[in-house]
Amino acid sequence: MLDETAKYHMDARAEEPFVPGVTEIWPSGAVLDETDRAALVEAALEMRIAAGPSSRRFESRFARKLGHRKAHLTNSGSSANLLAMTAFTSHLLEERRLRPQDEVITVAAGFPTTVNPILQNGLVPVFVDVELGTYNTTAARVAEAIGPRTRAIMIAHALGNPFEVAEIAQLAADHDLFLIEDNCDAVGSTYDGKLTGTFGDLTTVSFYPAHHLTTGEGGCVLTSNLALARIVESLRDWGRDCWCEPGETNKCLKRFQYQMGTLPEGYDHKYIFSHVGYNLKATDIQAALGLTQLDKLDAFCAARRRNWQRLRDGLEGTPHLLLPRATERSDPSWFGFALTVDPEAPFSRGALVDFLESRKIGTRRLFAGNLTRHPAYIDQPHRVVGDLTNSDIVTEQTFWIGVYPALTEEMLDYVISSVTEFVEKHS
Ligand SMILES: Cc1ncc(COP(=O)(O)O)c(C=O)c1O
């Protein structure tokens, strides 16, 4: 049956020739082959419909791949971010725990669910600006934002480009702050030769189809700190104190010997709750896909780097466009290729985007742009340090195009010639 599935995949996915202006050039998407389809079918045939052995196997392999001791699979990258931030409010951290009104430094221009968990935990986001070109903030901006109530830093590596994570981790250490790296867009990126996601206390990944590898919906929290891992697991799994997997009983050999809170002695540990938790688990069907995707991660990251470089070389010297640049000392595993139209350019960002879209070249915004300008955030407690001039420029002038592995050289060359043709015609 699995052989038939692989055959079905090959037949269904027969390569269509690329037709410029007709074939969609998506900015991102899942890259799925016959092994992925067979893995999904196998998991479905075995009816592994809840979290189970594939989830554990995926967590263990993914943790190792990303240089961590523990990974916890979740139902999205946003859930991973929520768990990571919430973990720092745990009573198990005693006096280091974050309390309502404590401040968390973050970036104004980015994805909303890097910031939302700060607000969802009654904490106060402190927004700093980004640099144009890297679309990241700097250690200097973060240092300036540290105030008496600052307790944590939560920042995403923008479009795969690492922020100055070694310096920011050092700032966190110097000021006794927690650091969460939102690595949702940057799996495989390095800074100073070290994988992003290995500098902070906790890191998160998204497995939504746009990302470096996919489980459909999905995400992950990673850490090498076993105490934090335990808190994340408890919060993910209803807030329970017990760490037996579903279906397991009495792994600790003292299931009926605990006394916690004001519960009676010997209350079943499986039903003792030490956190006000969630259920943010993923299923084994998702994990089965994650396992086959993981085998291809290195090839995916290499293709993203190659595609980004082809666009960068092809667009070098194009007037009126700011091309993206890697943060110094980094080697990004790119998520997208950002372009900022010079505000003084003789054409608008909108006109260029319309032209590209008319040629079936997909574009995306740098997510929310300046979050503080969105209806959801205007009335939320927050602090802004410095001005957000560049975040505003991003909101008005920036968009990105794709570098994901399914894009061919032919497609990328068509993107390059389309951009240059438009710019020449309007200059
Ligand atoms: C930087 C960043 N963080 C978090 C997320 C949320 O991930 P998910 O869509 O899996 O919830 C995304 C989504 O693209 C993202 O780009």
Image: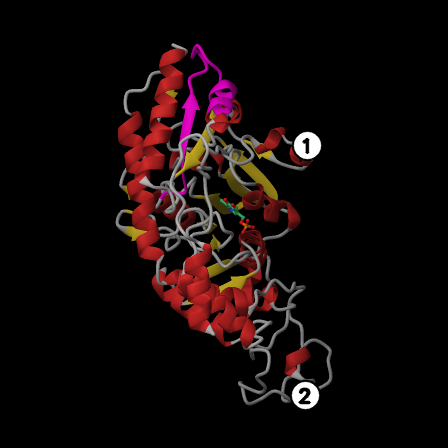
Q: Circle 2: is it few (<14), some (14-19), or many (20+) Cα within 10 Å?
A: few
* Magenta stretch, residue numbers: 334-355
Residue 9 placement: quadrant: bottom left
Residue type at tag 2: Gly
Up the image or down, 204 lies above or below 414; here it is below
Up the image or down, 170 lies above or below 388; here it is below
First reached walking from the N terminus: tag 1 or tag 2? 2
Q: Name the spot of residue 114 as percent of width and height, x first.
A: 54, 45
Question: Which residue is label 2 attached to?
Answer: 266
Question: Which residue is label 1 attached to?
Answer: 375
Residue at screen point 41% across, 70% down? 60
Q: Name the spot of residue 347 as percent of width and height, x first.
A: 46, 13
Pointer 1 residue Cβ closer than 8 Å to ligand 1: no
Specify whether 358 is left or right of 297.
right
Towards the viewer: 110 or 305: 305
Q: Secondary structure at mark 2?
A: loop
Residue at screen point 53% across, 58% down? 218
Towards the viewer: 240 or 350: 350
Residue at screen point 60% across, 72% down? 50
What's the mark number on residue 14?
Answer: none
Up the image or down, 167 lies above or below 197; here it is above
Q: Is residue 327 visible?
A: no
